[in-house]
Image (cartoon, coloured by chain):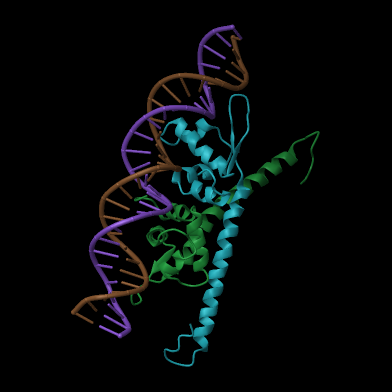
Chain colours: A cyan, B green, C brown, D purple
Amino acid sequence: MPGADQLSRVFAALADPTRRHMVARLTLADATVNELAEPYDVSVQAVSKHLRVLEEAGLVSRRREAQRRPVHLEAEVFDLMTTWIERYRRRAEERYQRLDALLASLPGEEGGETK
Amino acid sequence: MPGADQLSRVFAALADPTRRHMVARLTLADATVNELAEPYDVSVQAVSKHLRVLEEAGLVSRRREAQRRPVHLEAEVFDLMTTWIERYRRRAEERYQRLDALLASLPGEEGGETK
DNA sequence: CCCGTGTTCAACCAATCGGTTGGATACCGG
DNA sequence: CCGGTATCCAACCGATTGGTTGAACACGGG
């Protein structure tokens, strides 16, 4: 969507299985729109639209090469997601550790809610 | 999307900044719908809808506790994403290494830049 | 028991999405 | 310059999204 931040765009782009599949294919080699369209039974224009979504998310770039416009994966954008995910995963794990410590320090049966 | 796979659901769920913010908050502590709704100027029903999206993605669960229904983060689902991401990031990196090796082995004039 | 608080369900709405078809546009080879 | 191939832009369509409001449901405490 228009004013969306890049992280939202990246997640949204990868929410579509067709686009994930294209990204997977592009880890092997750059490809043209027609090559990318071949495995699916949708129109080339639909694939072109998917590529625009991936491009606006910063996941791919296109260069001009004669009539062709090969698509190239920009894998660094993955870091944006992993940074976000790892940050909160770490926080969640720390929370579990605190909870475990609390439970371990409790003397007995059930007890006093300290909140 | 009804028939979507879980990976698509997780990516789609996190494509919304409000939902990402809720997930971030839930790494600190479980919370009720009303507590989660408080920071935003949308209706409680809208927040309830967001929670349903997160729940269908497997990112949160809800238990019943008197009248309240506290929401709990299920952080393991993050692994689904990191597995996917790391798999293709690795492939992309391997591809770069092959490309570098190829370039290094070329009898080239310019560019023997080994970095 | 029933009132109030917390949450969900249902209908509706505008905007967006993923797809289509049809018509530009860009570039190369003859 | 002209034709062909590759790609994009524009208009349209049905389904989904994120939001609204209003009513229903589920409990626990006086």
Q: Is residue B84 left or right of residue D28?
A: right
Position above or below: B11 against D5: below
Q: Residue at x 54, y 77 (%)?
A: A97
Residue A27: x percent and y percent?
57, 44
Q: Nearer the viewer, residue A32 or B43?
A: B43
Q: Is residue B88 left or right of residue A47?
A: right
Work out whether residue A56 can be spotted.
yes
Q: Residue at x 45, y 92 (%)?
A: A108
Position above or below: B41 against A99: above
Q: Tell how many labels.
A: 0
Q: Nearer the viewer, residue D19 or B49?
A: D19
Residue D6: x percent and y percent?
53, 26
Position above or below: B106 against D22: above
Work out whether residue B68 can be spotted.
no
Residue A29: x percent and y percent?
58, 39
Q: Residue at x 36, y 76 (%)?
A: B65
Quadrant in the rendering for residue A101? bottom right
Q: Nearer the viewer, residue A105 or B38?
A: B38
Residue C8: x percent and y percent?
32, 63
